[in-house]
Image (cartoon, rainbow, N blue to C red):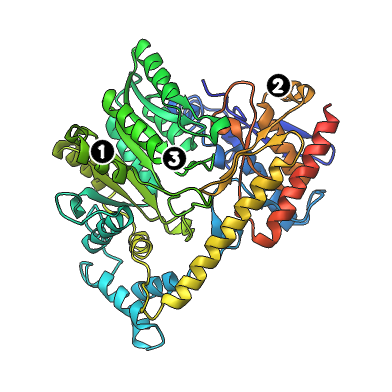
Amino acid sequence: KTQYPFPHFVFSHSSSSMSYIHRLHTVGVRNFSSTNTKRLVRSQISTKVLNAEYAVRGALVIRAIEIQQDLKKKAGDYPFEKVIMCNIGNPQELGQKPLTFHRQVLSSVLSPNLMQSGALPEDVTRRAQRLLGDTAAGSIGAYTHSQGLSVIRETVCDFICKRDGLQRSDSLINPSQIFLTDGASPGIKYVLQALIGDASDGILIPIPQYPLYSASIDLLGGTRIGYYLDEDNQWGFDIDEAQRAVAEAKSKGVTPKAIVFINPGNPTGNVLGDEDIRNAIRLAKEHNMVILADEVYQENIYGQQRKFSSFFKILNEMIGKDASFKSIELLSFHSVSKGIFGECGLRGGYMHLSGVETEGYDQLYKLVSVNLCPNTVGQSTVDLMCDPPKPGDASFELFDKEYKGLFQSLQRRANIVSTNLSQIDGISCQTIDGAMYAFPNIAIPKKAVQEAQNQGVTPDAFYCLQLLEQQGICCVPGSGFGQKDGSFHLRTTLLPPEHEIQKVVEKMAEFHRTFTAKYA
């Protein structure tokens, strides 16, 4: 069972000490007198909601926001001038600039009159007109089809085929198999909602994993089936470990209905090789499991010897050799929030169905329709992600310069973070081959472990809280993602600006030395 970092606690700061004095349900909520007539109180709220945890926006982050507010008001006594939010992959929060082409097209679809000025590049105007032409009345303020605009879903189909080196045909992929979504998360939750009926339905998730999965499974009343990634092998996929997890679940009367893969990995930064993916598909076929392929970091590949291969590509190669693999149900997810663009706040993404029967499609369509349609700005951004300017287009030169500049900066920052963290005595960090995070292993002294237990929190949460209070760096404890018993980790992003990232890891090194000495 997962040990949560801060079981129902948040923090209060004083100049002399930190104490855990408020229950989580008091955060941001007015205090009413005790009464039995209130329904939105802990005693009345669903236990599924109370038990769900989402570490990347959890109690430690709430504390970080409190400190930020104190610093703005010049209140409190902190040994730093600002909080560096390394808790979540939110590039533009940390200063990344949006791409010019994106902003010009989005401005044009929001305010079509801008296209009359003649100041915008021709390909910007052409793209905006193409998107507006597929709406109900030339306005993105109208509802769209529940799966999103058809012209954008066509773009997604072309993108997938180009990425995977496949010949486009409706028998291979067509717009009806594409659901545009408000980021990748809603699509993932739709599928989990369709699969989980009760606690006898299990979902295999990697450990460590992104807590969207654990929280969603808990909220739906399903059972989490964890399979450990191999930390000693660049957080690789271990087929024997996955088989162990399946067998153990079945022995307890739990039916493994799906398996989740996050590639590139969050929080680990690993990239699955082609043989890993083939083994994963064979496993899913053997145990009749749906595959959920979370591929939102597919553009974030930094390792020179690494490449991204999609599950869809490898599955089609396997089908070409053995038609029995057509039985595989694969649902793949992508998002505008990650990659090089980092358009998190625009909430755009897609879900691609492969091998799903019509009756399954119908039920997913029903779930999607409850929310009417995905937001149209996010939909438009998916089109921009999947079909960027090409050589010869008016916007290409600037787009290419901005894109390469962002990618190369991320690549350098990945190297700075993993290299420098590994040089700290008591910290080991695998090479960051992909995604936006490091997940270093932290040696925590026994006295610190005991002090954390005395305070009612996990040792890595205790470590991260002290890192926040002493250095102003907000990371997420590894226990929020899952880890082997007796090991401790934290997740940090590599997103602080390049001119600051070296200072961030130096401050982490200084803190670790001080912390270790204090609890030696």
* N-terminal label among 3 and 1: 3
Which residue bears the numbered disc 3?
272
- Tag 2: amino acid: Gln
Where on the picture, by quarter, is residue 222? Answer: top left
| Residue at the limit of the structure toward the bottom, as seen here | 118
| Structural distance between the alpha carbons of marks 2 and 3 | 36 Å
**Residue 163, above or below 248:** below
| Structural distance between the alpha carbons of marks 1 and 2 | 50 Å
Which residue bears the numbered disc 1?
318
Q: Residue at x 27, y 76 (%)?
A: 129
Where on the picture, by quarter, is residue 499? Answer: bottom right
The foreground one among 347 and 425 is: 425
- In this view, the mark in front (1 or 2): 1
The foreground one among 4 and 384 is: 384
Image quarter of the C terminus: top right
| Structural distance between the alpha carbons of marks 3 and 1 | 17 Å
Which residue bears the numbered disc 2?
453
